[in-house]
Image (cartoon, coloured by chain):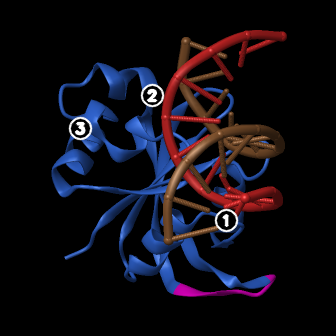
Chain colours: A blue, B red, C brown
DNA sequence: GCCAACGTTGGC
DNA sequence: GCCAACGTTGGC
């Protein structure tokens, strides 16, 4: 059973469009112990929600874990994973929408916006996908 | 540009 | 090993 996660990126650093272009990319540069823990818990095939911070704050697409966690080549103390692009959301789900939702407002990510990788329950994942239609 | 939340650092 | 001070991040 695949798990769901939410990963966050600044569009100016690495945008959804870059992932679409690259197809698969190394998700590195995570420098937070909690986020690293989540990275290491990822399994191949887990689904990822891709969120843009900074500009329009919204979930723009989904990706899948292509390679489970391994040491960051730039700094072995940290971990990274490989991810592959999945689908763009028909309708991006904004932070405001999440906050207005009765269960999604309790997402780890909503409550702790600084955390760059956070878990999403299967129920919440379904709710997000429903909002994105 | 401000402020709140959180992580990290350094003195003890 | 604790805790205060500081820096960074991200939403508003």
Residue receiving disc 1: A31
Would residue A49 appear left or right of A78 to someone viewing this image?
A: left
Would residue C2 appear left or right of A110 to someone viewing this image?
A: right
Q: Residue at x 55, y 68 (%)?
A: A33
- Prevailing SS of the magenta stretch: strand
- CA gap, disc 3 to disc 1? 32 Å
Badge 3: residue crowd in 10 Å (few <14, some 14–19, many ≥20): few
Q: Quadrant of the N terminus of chain A?
A: bottom left
Q: Quadrant of the C terminus of chain A?
A: top left
Q: Residue at x 16, y 50 (%)?
A: A123
- Residue A57 shows up from this direction: yes
Residue A67, percent from left and from top: 52, 85
Q: Chain of mark 1?
A: A
Check residue A91 for magenta coloring.
no
Q: Chain of mark 2?
A: A
Badge 2: residue crowd in 10 Å (few <14, some 14–19, many ≥20): many
Q: Residue at x 42, y 20 (%)?
A: A96
Residue A87, percent from left and from top: 45, 54
Would residue A30 appear left or right of B1 to someone viewing this image?
A: left
Q: Residue at x 51, y 64 (%)?
A: A35
Residue receiving disc 2: A95
A39 and C3: which one is in front? C3
- CA gap, disc 2 to disc 1? 23 Å
Q: Quadrant of residue A79?
A: bottom right
Q: Chain of mark 3?
A: A
A65 to B2, vertically: above or below: below
Residue receiving disc 3: A130
Mark 3 vs mark 1: which is more N-terminal? Answer: 1
């Amino acid at each position: 059973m695949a798990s769901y996660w939410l990963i966050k990126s600044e569009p100016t650093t690495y945008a959804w469009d870059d992932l679409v272009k690259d197809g698969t990319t190394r998700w590195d540069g995570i420098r937070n112990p909690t986020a690293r823990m989540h990275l290491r818990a990822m399994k191949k095939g887990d689904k990822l929600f891709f969120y843009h911070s900074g500009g329009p704050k919204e979930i723009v697409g989904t990706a899948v874990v292509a390679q489970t966690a391994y040491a960051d080549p730039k700094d072995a103390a940290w971990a990274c994973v490989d991810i592959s692009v999945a689908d763009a959301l028909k309708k991006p789900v904004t932070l405001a929408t999440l906050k207005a939702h009765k269960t999604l407002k309790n997402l780890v990510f909503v409550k702790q916006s600084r955390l760059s990788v956070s878990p999403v329950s299967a129920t919440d994942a379904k709710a997000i996908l429903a909002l994105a239609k």
